[in-house]
Image (cartoon, rainbow, N blue to C red):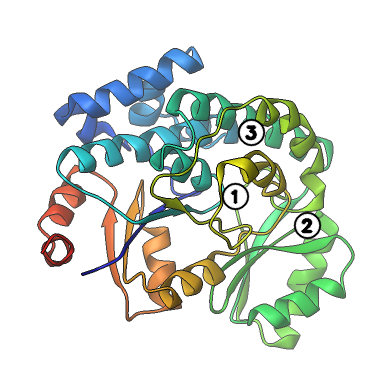
C-alpha cells in the first residue's frame, strides 16, 4: 500500500483567479474563504479571484491567500475521502501543513501568516535585498560560492541544480558575475520584496517572537515533517521552529529525499500551481506525483490509480 505525503507550496505559486472554480462548486471552500475574510477584515476571495496581481503579490496578502486556497482544496479532498500519512510545506507552506495535521487552528494560522507577511515586508524595507536562483550548480558549489562573497547565503535547496540564494543587492550582483565562471548555467533574479531565509530578515523573526510564543499548538496528526529542521516535529518545538525558519534555509531537496528513503512513495501537491510537483520529479522521478491546484485537477486526482492502491 502506498505511503502518501501531502505537500504545500509557498510564495511564488499565487495567481489571480486561484480558488474561484472551487468556491463556486463547494460550500466547504466557501467556508474557508469566509473564515479567512473574518480574520483579515477584507474580502480575501475578491483579491484572489480578481486581483490585481500587484496586490495579491504583496507578501502580507500572498501568505494568507495561499494558505486559504490550499486549505480550501484540502477540505474538499478530505470530504471526498482523501487521507495522507505525512505533511510538509515549502517555507510558508509549513503553516499550511500544520493546519492540515491539526497542529494549528486555521483562523490562528491566517492571523500568524498575515503577521509574518507584514514582518517580512518591513524587514525587506529595513535591510533591502533580494533572491536569485542559481541554475546548473550543485549545492556544495553554491555554498562555496556564497562563502566567498560578503552578504549572500543559500536560502532554498530546491532540487538538483537549483539553489536559491538570498543577499544584499551588491552581493547578488557579485554572485551573478562570478557564478558562470564556476559552471552555473544561469542566475535568475526572483520577484520578491526581500532576502528571505537569510540573516537580513532577522527583524521579522523578532517581530514574530511574541505572536508565536502565545500561539497554541497541538500534536500533529498525522505526522508533520519540517523542511527546515529535516525532522518529524512535535507540538513542543513548533513555535521555535517557525521562528527559526524565517532566517534558516528551506531544505526541500533533502526533505523529499529523506521521506523517499523512509518509504513515502506518493507526493500530492495541494495548492495553486505545480512548482513542488516539478521539483519532486527532478529530485526523484521514481515516486508518484499528483497535483491538486484547482477543481479540475482535484477531480482528476480522485480518479487517479494511486488512490485505488492507497485504499486497497
- Give coordinates of residue 294: x percent, y percent: 25, 44
Q: Quadrant of residue 308?
A: bottom left
C-alpha separation, residue under disc 3 versus residue under disc 1: 18 Å
Element type at mark 2:
strand
Residue shown at the point (43%, 28%) measured from the top left: 106
User: How far separated are the C-alphas under marks 3 and 2?
Assistant: 19 Å
Kindly report the distance in space between the C-alpha atoms of the residues bearing marks 1 and 2. Answer: 14 Å
Image position of 208 (left or right of 258): right
Figure quadrant of the C terminus: bottom left
Residue in the picture at 9% in, 57% down: 303
Q: Residues within 10 Å of mark 2 (few under 14, many from 20)?
A: many
Residue where numbered disc 1 is placed: 191
Asked if residue 43 can be seen in this view, the reply is no
- Is the N terminus in the top left, top right, bottom left or bottom right quadrant? bottom left
Label disc, if present, on residue 116 of the rendered structure: 3
Q: Quadrant of residue 190?
A: bottom right
Residue shown at the point (54%, 78%) measured from the top left: 160
SS for callout 3: helix
Q: Earlier in the sequence, mark 1 or mark 2?
A: 2
In front of the other: 131 or 267: 267
Residue occupying the point 33% across, 38% down: 18
- Looking at the image, is mark 3 or mark 2 nearer the viewer? 3
Q: Nearer the viewer, mark 1 or mark 2?
A: 2
Amino acid at each position: 500500500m502506498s505511503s502518501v505525503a501531502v505537500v504545500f507550496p509557498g510564495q511564488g505559486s499565487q495567481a489571480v483567479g486561484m480558488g474561484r472554480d472551487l468556491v463556486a462548486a463547494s460550500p466547504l471552500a466557501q467556508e474557508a474563504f469566509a473564515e479567512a475574510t473574518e480574520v483579515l477584515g477584507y474580502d480575501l476571495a475578491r483579491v484572489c479571484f480578481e486581483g490585481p496581481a500587484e496586490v495579491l503579490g504583496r507578501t502580507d496578502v500572498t501568505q494568507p491567500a495561499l494558505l486559504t486556497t490550499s486549505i480550501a482544496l484540502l477540505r474538499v479532498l478530505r470530504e471526498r475521502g482523501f487521507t495522507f500519512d505525512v505533511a510538509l510545506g515549502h517555507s510558508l507552506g509549513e503553516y499550511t501543513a500544520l493546519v492540515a495535521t491539526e497542529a494549528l487552528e486555521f483562523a490562528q494560522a491566517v492571523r500568524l501568516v498575515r503577521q509574518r507577511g507584514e514582518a517580512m515586508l518591513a524587514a525587506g524595507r529595513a535591510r533591502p535585498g533580494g533572491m536569485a536562483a542559481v541554475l546548473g550548480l550543485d549545492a556544495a558549489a553554491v555554498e562555496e560560492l556564497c562563502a566567498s562573497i560578503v552578504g549572500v547565503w543559500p536560502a532554498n535547496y530546491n532540487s538538483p541544480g537549483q539553489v536559491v540564494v538570498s543577499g544584499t543587492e551588491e552581493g547578488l550582483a557579485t554572485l551573478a558575475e562570478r557564478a558562470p565562471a564556476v559552471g552555473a548555467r544561469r542566475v535568475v533574479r526572483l520577484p520578491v520584496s526581500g532576502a528571505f531565509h537569510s540573516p537580513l530578515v532577522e527583524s521579522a523573526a523578532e517581530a514574530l517572537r511574541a505572536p508565536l510564543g502565545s500561539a497554541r499548538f497541538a500534536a500533529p496528526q498525522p505526522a508533520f515533517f519540517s523542511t527546515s529542521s529535516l525532522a518529524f516535529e512535535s507540538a513542543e518545538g513548533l513555535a521555535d521552529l517557525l521562528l527559526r525558519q524565517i532566517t534558516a534555509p528551506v531544505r526541500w531537496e533533502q526533505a523529499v529525499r529523506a521521506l523517499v528513503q523512509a518509504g513515502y512513495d506518493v507526493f500530492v501537491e495541494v495548492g495553486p500551481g505545480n512548482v513542488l510537483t516539478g521539483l519532486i520529479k527532478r529530485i526523484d522521478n521514481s515516486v508518484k506525483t499528483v497535483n491538486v491546484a484547482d477543481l479540475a485537477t482535484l477531480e482528476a486526482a480522485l480518479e487517479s490509480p494511486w488512490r485505488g492502491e492507497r485504499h486497497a
